[in-house]
Image (cartoon, helix red, strand yellow):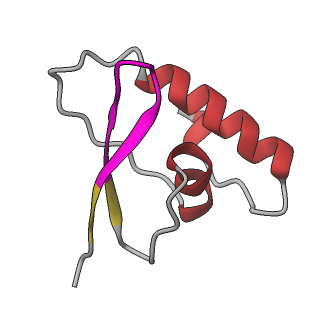
Amino acid sequence: MPALNQVYLADLGGMKETAEKSGKFMKTIPANQLTILVSHVSNILAIAGVSLSSGEMAVVHIDASGSIVVDGRIKVP
């Protein structure tokens, strides 16, 4: 999915576009379907508003209003 390709923090327009396209895609995934998406730190910041360390994962869900909510973070040793 091209929207998960790396976008640089200085590219504010690209980050906004990434967040919109990725969020739109994520909302098409059935709520009861576990899904893993792999991307880059800058993209995850744009999509979920959380800044992760290298190798760290964010666990998210879409709430009733359609917002992406961070449930937790997983650090890989």
Q: Is residue 53 above or below residue 29?
A: below
Q: Nearer the viewer, residue 14 or 5?
A: 14
Picture mark count = 0
**Residue 22 x/y as whole percent:** 54, 32
Q: Is residue 43 left or right of residue 73?
A: right
State whether the magenta stretch is mostly helix, strand or loop.
strand
Residue 72 at x, y percent in the picture: 27, 58
* Quadrant hosting residue 29: top left
| Depicted 20 relative to depicted 24: above or below | below
Let me know if residue 58 is in the magenta part. Answer: no
Residue sticking out furthest to the front: 65
Q: Quadrant of the C terminus?
A: bottom left
Q: Is residue 53 left or right of 3 when viewed as pictured?
A: left
Q: Is residue 13 left or right of residue 37?
A: right
Residue at the bottom extreme of this rendering? 77
Residue 49 in the image: above or below residue 24: below
Q: What stretch of residues is rendered in magenta? A: 59-71
Q: Position of residue 51 (x, y in %)?
A: 52, 67
At horizontal 25% and vertical 35% (from top left) the residue drawn is 35
* Residue drawn at the location 54% of the way across and 63% of the way down: 41
Asked whether 45 or 5 is in front, the reply is 45
In the image, residue 60 lies in the stretch drawn in magenta: yes
Q: Where does residue 2 sit, x and y in percent of width and height?
A: 61, 35
Give the residue drawn at x 45%, y 21%: 66
For image coordinates 15% across by 21% down, the residue present is 32
